[in-house]
Amino acid sequence: MANHDTHSRDNAVAGVSRRQLLGRATATACGAAIAVAAGTQSAQAGQISQAAAGYQPMPKGDQRCDGCTLFQPPTGCKFVSGTISPQGWCKLYVKRS
Amino acid sequence: MRSIVSPARGITAVASLLAAAFFASPAAAVPSFAEQTGQPCSACHVGAFGPQLTPFGRAFKMGGYTLRAGGFTDPISGMAIASYLNTAKDQAAPPAPHYGVNDNATVDQVSVFVAGGIDDTFGGFAQFTYDGVGRAFGWDTLDLRAVTDATWFGTPVQAGLSLNNAPGVQDPWNTLPAWGFPYTGSSLAPAPAAGTIMDGALAQSVIGMTAYADWDSHIYTEASLYWSPGRHFLSMMGADEGAGRITAVAPYLRAAWHDDAGDWNYEIGAFAFLPDLYPGGDASTGTSDLYSDLGIDASYQYAGDSTAIYGVNLRYTREHQHLAASMLLGGAANLTNDLNAFNADASYYWHNTFGGTIGFFDSWGSADPLLYAGSALAKPDSTGFTFQIDGTVFGRDMALLDGRFNIRAGLQYVVYTKFNGAHSNYDGLGSNAPDNNTLRIFLWTAL
């Protein structure tokens, strides 16, 4: 029967075991988490594309961009890039209160 | 929350592991994202408190948590849950050290989040939790992303990568176990012994790399590979191998069709998770247990003008188990078993302030006297309802501390009509399913 140590050796590749590789990948992930925290200091205003937002230049029912809290007149949006029609709509719609 | 597992060698703890995971849905509420987007909690979350996502919240998640209204925002958030628990009949033994057999009050968890987005490409969050019941600190939910926009085969695509630590954590809907109802639970509560591997049995015990693509805002596709990190790493993170150690890598696949009609939206999807495990991390048999979790899910949400929000989530999972290793280790009587699980919930929220949810759960499958030793009929069958009402004080236009502070108070009641195989005398010792009916009053706050 194989034990855990032999299992690790079985998976050794080019002097580096699978476990070591995975451990390094995990350490990289944790480093990335820290980078996320640090990186927020230099972040620019983040937007998504019109395609990703499902933007359309016409209303969806009674929902339209000029009734959305994210709309920035005359033709802008806080979170969706490009020119935005006041009569448009996307799935980020948040009704202006 | 993290699954809790005995470090004992072998597979004897598999069923209890699944039980621990049954109601241990990860709880998350991340005020850093509210500050980052300049939006109230209600923009991303139904009921103005996580984790039930609105279309905006799903877009924020699929977009890699990168939406940002301005410059620097504080990436650190905190969250805590405390609760009181009462069961219809005293439990046979205290559910954890330092607790009684009934009427337990506890701090369930205290979490710290590091969360944020960088430019238009990178974002994510890492949650670290003090488990107030287990009195241990460890990592909790992790989701780190990189995203981009592309045009593939003439179709606009939002594509991304996610590094996460539980199958389903990366999912944008609330149909899968990782973010499914109930959104908060207690490990002090009685729970059925059987649950699928997808039901959190490997949460925080694995690492996964996910590649996903959302095609024309309608077709969501995803492929992931999960693996088990080393024991030393898991130990450092306050975790263990959960239900088992993945022998190499385990594939996870997901696809969904979704549409947003403005006032309402829906999703219909399917998922598959195929882990090959050394049960309890024990590879001494030279063989392993192969699980095949295949499922379908659907959700519907009506938000209208947000004065009344209705939601429905459905999930069916069929798990096929090939338990070659468990048989040799004495943890299963059958080489193959099947386990089915159906979950549904329907919710209503009034002005994102007061809400009510009814959940239904049902599991059934093959009898196995070793795997389900706590059942007199050796069956995994359990059926019941979860009722919840809750109120959320802030999280809409009015908020404290720049929108960061929020608090929810709620009452849950879990009713069992079948528990571990039967309604009556399910354990052969005279216990009945309704004995486990559980009342839980909770207070959940985020800052």
Image (cartoon, helix red, strand yellow):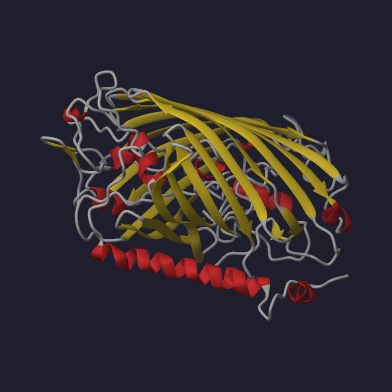
| Residue at 83% over, 36% down | B377
Residue A34 point in image, percent of width and height = 38, 68
Q: Quadrant of residue A94?
A: top left
Tell whether B234 sits left or right of B396.
Answer: right
Q: Number of callouts in the render?
A: 0
Residue B163 point in image, percent of width and height = 50, 58
| Residue at 68% over, 81% down | A15
Q: Quadrant of residue A33?
A: bottom left
Most extreme residue toward the bottom is A15
A13 or B56: nearer the eye?
A: A13
Residue B118 point in image, percent of width and height = 31, 59
Most extreme residue toward the front is B154
Residue A48 visible somewhere in the drawing: yes
| Residue at 40% over, 46% down | B61
**Vertical order, A69 against B135 (above or below):** above
Residue B347 visible somewhere in the drawing: no
Tell whether B281 sits left or right of B352.
Answer: right
Tell whether A13 sits left or right of B155.
Answer: right
Tell whether B235 sits left or right of A73.
Answer: right
Most extreme residue toward the top is A61
Q: Quadrant of the C terminus of chain B?
A: bottom left
| Residue at 20% over, 43% down | A78
B276 or B427: nearer the eye?
A: B276
**Vertical order, B55 against B280 (above or below):** above
B380 or B132: nearer the eye?
A: B380
